[in-house]
Amino acid sequence: MHEPAGARAPSDLDDLVGADLTARVTVDEHGTVTGWNAGAERLLGHPAGEIVGRPAAGLLAEPPRGRDLPPFPRLRRWHGTVALRHRDGRTLTAKVLAHHRTRENGRREWFCVSAPPDRPSPPERHDDPFVSWSFTQSPCCATALYDTRLRLRRANRAMERAVALTEDDMLGLRVGEIVDDPAGRRAEESMARVLRTGEVEVDEDFLTAAGETRVGAWSLLMSPLRDAGGVVQGVCLTAHDMTEQHWARRRLQLIAEAGRRIGTTLDVMRTAQELADVIVPELADFASVDLLTAVDDPPDTSRRGPPPGPLELLRAAHQSVTPGVPEAVTALGSLDRFSEGSAPVETLRSGHATVYEMTHPAITALVAHDPVRAARVREFGIHSVMTVPLTARGTTLGVAVLARHRHPEIFQQDDVVLAEELAARAAVCMDNARRYTHERDRSVTLQRSLLPQRLPEQAAVEVATRYLPAGAHTGVGGDWFDVIPLSGARVALVVGDVVGHGIHASATMGRLRTAVRTLADIDLAPDELLTHLDDLVSRLSTERDGGRTRERHPECGGEVGATCLYAVYDPISRRCSLARAGHPPPVVVAPGGAAERVDLPPGPPLGVGGLPFEAAEIDLPEGSLLALYTDGLITPGGRSRAGDGEADVSRLSGLLTGPEPTLDALCDRILTDLLPPRPPDDVALLVARTRALDASQVATWQVPSTPSAVAQARKDALARLDAWGLEDAAFVTELVVSELVTNAIRHARPPVQLRLIHLTHEDSLICEVSDGDSTAPHLRRARTFDEGGRGLLLVAQLTRRWGTRQSSHGKTIWAEQPLDV
């Protein structure tokens, strides 16, 4: 054949089979001859130079009549007998087999072959009739016999059915000429090896048989045919149709792959996209997943199916064999309205998968009032659609729509079964994700409601906080933080973490936070506060109604465990007292200095019981940074980038020394740099910049333990108020100083000290009286003729708040009054 430019060079296989024995001609879609080999020249006498580029119709002995021509553009193959005109003018009758194929450049052409006139005839059939019958009528395998030039000599009926050609149509042709497919070329190469080696070849090939639209799988066995002397005289090719087994394996593989790829996250939209990704291209050329907008309702909703009337569906996912998914008419995350009677609505109503051809009323109803969707159907040539409901645990979640346009075969029943299996798996995963999301939202809502909604105003520190719930399957945990104003302008900073996740962890966190606030209100030292908190956690672990609560509610777990870091900072002394219970130590940055972890005694986690806690004190100059955090920020279990806790602490230290304009910006930078987008554990972060009270804001006097010292204490206090310009507060301050100093002198032991603190940040005044007695005063109702008992009641009525705190040397009674009234 006259080979076009770029054709391959002759191979050993072509030499073996005698490629030019067959007349081979190619004709383009316009009927022009584009290829002509030596076999064609030998058949009709025309050299290639005379024929290539001329109309093929000129080779016919009689011009064809239009009405007699078959619909060539729609055919995949044609065969028959054709009357041809030889170059010398005589008429020849030849059997022609023509394949309609697409070249690498996308152009369509006809590849025509004709066996040589002296083609080999079937061998003499002198064998036993039973042997002949068994060959021709064998129902098990398609069998064909080829000679040493790999030209067909015999074919049984199964082979004739497989290729839709008779034995007479195939006589003298090669496998690659009978089957115009790369599989034919591979089979010929295997048969050539059989001739050379005399050994059996086994292969598996995939091709679309004549009259079929689905690719078939064939198991090929090529064995040598030997004469009595053992010389190879040909090849026996047997082909076993494994299509059903192949597609069954493919379906099982797709189901197994779906099990790995669908439901990798507890996210409804992501699961829907995973379903679409599995469907395309294995099962459909385009797939969309649309969910009922009510899918976000609580899982225990009483509605089991879609509401009556037209439906609005949310486009959760789509995928296509065409880049950019141009078939889609609805954007991801958008709502689309479907009328009653349309295919998606009918499927949601019936709860069964349905296959539609484009003339079905459910499809025409879908596109009738949607010109964009109708245009997409015409543009891509969509020929069949399948709609599959997404149902799990009796609740309908949505519908998957599958369409084919590149795949030539309409959806079959096997496709329906496979699609239903995939949809059922995805629906269960989506329902799990929906239930998880609902539960997690409740947990997050509960946890956020238990965290501080706004930080209290106080003069000791500037604070910024962040709470980031876990993004992994573990759910919401029990991390918390708190900022608690204390007496004497001090402040308590707290960060804690309850072991476990879910609503129970959040509820336990709320109880512990309340307990910390209660214990902080009585001004316990950090180590003492953690000791009381440890007792509480131990009681929580054993108060399960003798185990009955755990039996009824397994999610409540058994033992309660938690960690906590408690720090108290005094802006007057600029000292900070800290203690921790199994919690990561804080990081501190002095002004202009390097960041370093505070060397704190570790302390056991809360709930262990019986082990002591130790506090440590550090100096914090004004402007120091103190970072408290939970282990989700720095431990390997809380990260996916570095996975090294020490390395993460070093990175945190570097970030704390960086130039950030505000503490809020610093917190954001820390979370962005240290955490993945979806951290596997909750994270709580508290960053505080210390302030200090100027000496001019604090006045202190030592008071002698004599009744006459009360008057002098009042005079000193009033003089200080005049210096501060707080004359309006003189009346209340004089009364408070008189009452507290008198009680200290009368009922307690020396030394007695009076201190006034002017908090300009909060516009308030604190009066403190300290003594050497640890007995705390209390309010009591004085009777009519009692001489005492009314002083503390007056103090409580005239001030914003008052209280007492213990120290290693006695106690301090304090009262705070506002200055803005």
Image (spheres, rainbow, N blue to C red):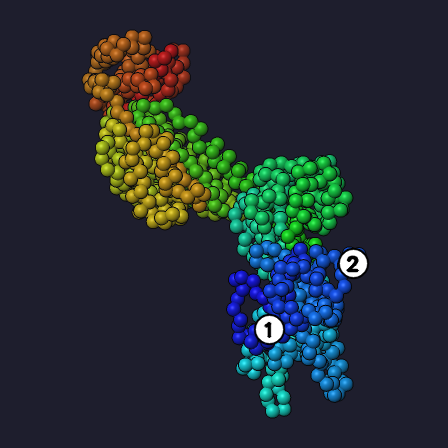
| Residue drawn at x 39%, y 19% as measured from the top left | 780
The image quarter in which residue 660 lies: top left
Q: Find residue 120 and report its horizontal and vertical position in percent.
A: 68, 80
Q: Find residue 796 and report its horizontal and vertical position in percent.
A: 37, 17
* Kind of residue sitting beneath label 1: Ala
Q: How many marks?
A: 2
The residue tagged with tag 1: helix, strand or loop? helix
Count neighbours of disc 2 (C-alpha within 10 A) and say few if under 14, some if 14 to 19, many if 20 or more: few
Label 2, on which residue?
65
Residue 597 sits above or below residue 463 on the image: below
The disc label shown at residue 19, or none: 1
Quadrant occupied by the C terminus: top left
Viewer-nearest residue: 566 or 385: 385
Q: Find residue 479 and report its horizontal and vertical position in percent.
A: 42, 39
Q: Tell which circle, 2 or 1, labels the residue nearer the N-terminal end.
A: 1
Residue 611 in view: no
Q: Residue placed farthest to the right in the image? A: 67
Q: Residue placed farthest to the bottom in the image? A: 229
Horizontal relation, residue 495 to residue 38: left or right: left
Horizontal relation, residue 59 to residue 583: left or right: right
The residue tagged with tag 2: helix, strand or loop? loop
Horizontal relation, residue 761 to residue 151: left or right: left
| Residue drawn at x 64%, y 77% as measured from the top left | 151
